[in-house]
Amino acid sequence: MSRFEHLRARHPRFTYEDYAVERRGEDLTLTFSFTMAPDVAFAPTTTLHAADATRLASLPAEALDNLAFHLGMIELLSYWKTACAPEIVIKAGALDAEQVAWWRDLVLHGMREFFFVNGIDFRRDDLFTLVTSPRAGRPTARFDAALPDAEDLVLVSGGKDSAFTLEFLRERGHAVRALFLNPAPAARDVARVAGCARSLIVARTLDPAMLALNKAGYLNGHTPFSAYLAFLGAACAVVYGHRNVVVSNERSCDEPAAHYLGADVIHQYSKTYRFEALVADYLRRHLAREVLLWSLLRPLYELQVVKLFSAFPRQFPVFRSCNRGSKANTWCGECAKCLSIYTALYPFVSDAEIRGIFGADLFARADLVPLARALVGLTETRPLECVGAIDETLAAFHLSREKAAGAGRPLPPVLAWFAEDVAPRHPDLAVTAARILDDWSDRHGVPAAYADALRARLSRPRG
């Protein structure tokens, strides 16, 4: 019996029992109660700090309950995955048949990387059943009142994407408020450097019991974190009073990293346009009628975003996009994400600037060639990281090689490998690079005025 089958047999049922909404002064703490039969219980919390007490008092209890219930729905995936119980029972609130189908679709798509890494057949009919009752839980209701649009609420992680979003919106004269979730130093720093004086902080605490199960050999892996951020953003929009919830996911997020059991595996599926459109509709229909969730960067490739970001050198010392180094607020210089961002940024900044960001010349590292091979699609599986699509990564290496060659120095090992082994197979890389840098996708939900300004920004020189 596989570990997956063993754990499912040991824990046949996962139940979303209840949630609690507790106001402590200006803080709003949500506690979720999950059980995993026969003997495991989880109680994670999420706290929205410094909410306006007057506004909190004016919000209907049914609307707050609805926001809490849905945050629990997305939270439960992190705990269900430990054993993948074949039955998921929702006692805390009601879902109709259409909503059940929506959540099932999210699990099957948003957890596909998890299924791939753990060798789980997501096609099996008995993978999970979502059981709910229209009479379950306490009464909940969509928030139907107007939401102010004086400030854009921007989710900020500290990477280049959210840093550019802040800089762009501030440059255009928009009032912005940063939304931080358990903020790393880089998140606070990019907001400060962008001149964002207003922020709100959310603290999410994982239950230690889940971490103990992970150490004990239970299942672990990726869950749709950006889906959690979407529901959190909607909750914050209601609690703090914002209409626009702005994220920073570009069109490169749609590219698969692998293929598994006849289907695409997309790293961070919940960053894709498909999910963005589905969740934006769900939020408006079931959580808050006026909330608008959209990604400013959706029309663009990552390479275009990096070029635009390069116009804000004041962000170079503070932004961080390396997952491995996030806790220490550093770039590890060893991972696919570091090399991907280094390659994309290299053509658009000076040698001094790129060395100042990363502290070293990553192209001089011959040991990084295997990572480079994976980035350009020469391995069966691309890195399960947020990296550029294959075509734009090829274009980035081409532009980097052209810049380095123009300096009249011998090519460093990574670029020498690219010039000798990869470039000859792609004779039209100059055309590809020009196409990508000028491209624009109409598959987005960006409001027209923002989209027009972003498109105009593409043609502006750096600075």
Image (cartoon, rainbow, N blue to C red):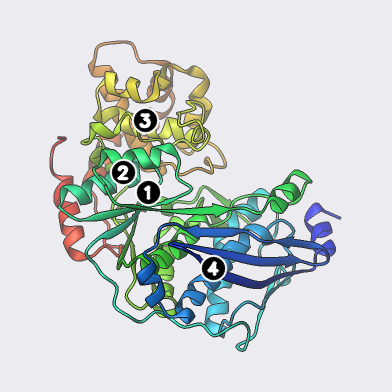
- Dots 2, 4 in contact, CB < 8 A: no
Residue 139's place in the image compared with 103, above or below, is: below
For the C terminus, which image quadrant? top left
Pinpoint residue 308: horizontal percent, then vertical percent. Answer: 23, 41
Of tags 4 and 1, the one toward the viewer is 4
Q: Secondary structure at mark 4?
A: strand
User: Mark 3 highlights which residue?
Assistant: 343
- Indicate which label's residue lies in the foreground, 3 or 4: 4
Circle 2 sits on which residue? 191
- Disc 2 is placed on an element classified as helix
Residue 156's disc number: 1
Kindly identify which numbered label has been placed on residue 22. Answer: 4
Q: Secondary structure at mark 3?
A: helix
Give the distance between the C-alpha atoms of the residues marked 4 and 1, in whole angstroms: 26 Å
Who's the residue at 39% across and 20% down the image? 359
Alpha carbon separation for disc pair 2 and 3: 25 Å
Horizontal relation, residue 440 to residue 463: left or right: right
